[in-house]
Image (cartoon, rainbow, N blue to C red):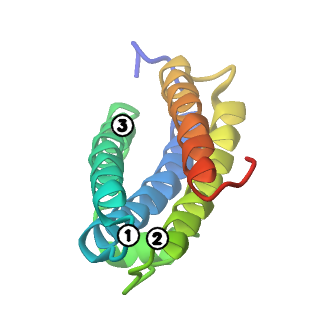
Amino acid sequence: MAVIRLKKKESKLISKALNNLLANYQVFYMNARGYHWNIKGDKFFELHLKFEELYDDLQIKIDEIAERILTLGRSPLHTFEDYLKQAKIHSTPNVEDSVTSVKNVLKSLELLIKIQREILSLTEELDEGTNALMSDYIREQEKLYWMYSAFLNHKP
């Protein structure tokens, strides 16, 4: 850790928070795949594409989070049992309608943004790499939240 300059205690604390984030991302990713596959109705073409964009982005972030945990000298969670135990985002099977699927996306984004803000606070003075990652994710997801809210004609 000479290059990163984190103490073992700090590295462990940050990695634990990142593993929690990773678990939530993984469940959200699987939900987004399900929305993509199962969406029906008059918004099918629009949402089918948006959900594909969403899960593609989530997949990239999942890999970045896992690699950040490895960079910190720790091991990322890698079983669905672990993800389901830790995640606050719950599995949402058999969602087919546009309103429910988009509401679920919004709930998941809210939770991710909340967790990432907590990690941002935790890493503010300790870990620039993780801090920058969280800042980037929050900025992107706040915009996504606004866009999905607009789809439902809600104010963020």
Residue wearing tag 3: 73
Would residue 79 be seen by someone viewing this image from the given angle?
A: no
Image position, residue 151 (x, y; %): 56, 53
89 relative position to 59: left or right? right
Tell us which disc is closer to us: 2 or 3: 2
Quick check: marks 1 and 3 in contact, CB under 8 Å?
A: no
Residue at 33% across / 73% down in the picture?
A: 39
143 relative position to 1: left or right? right
Q: What residue type is labelled 2?
A: Ser
Q: Which quadrant is the N terminus positioned in?
A: top left
Residue wearing tag 2: 98
How far is the residue under mark 2 from the one under mark 3? 41 Å
Residue at 65% across / 54% down in the picture?
A: 110
Q: What residue type is labelled 3?
A: Gly
Q: Which residue lies furthest to the bottom in this view?
A: 94
Vertical placement of residue 82 versus 24, above or below: below
First of labels 2, 3 by sequence position? 3
Image position, residue 91 (x, y; %): 44, 79
Residue wearing tag 1: 42
Image position, residue 51 (x, y; %): 34, 56
Q: Is mark 3 on a helix, strand or loop?
A: loop
First of labels 1, 3 by sequence position? 1
First of labels 2, 1 by sequence position? 1
107 relative position to 85: left or right? right
Q: What residue type is labelled 1?
A: Asp
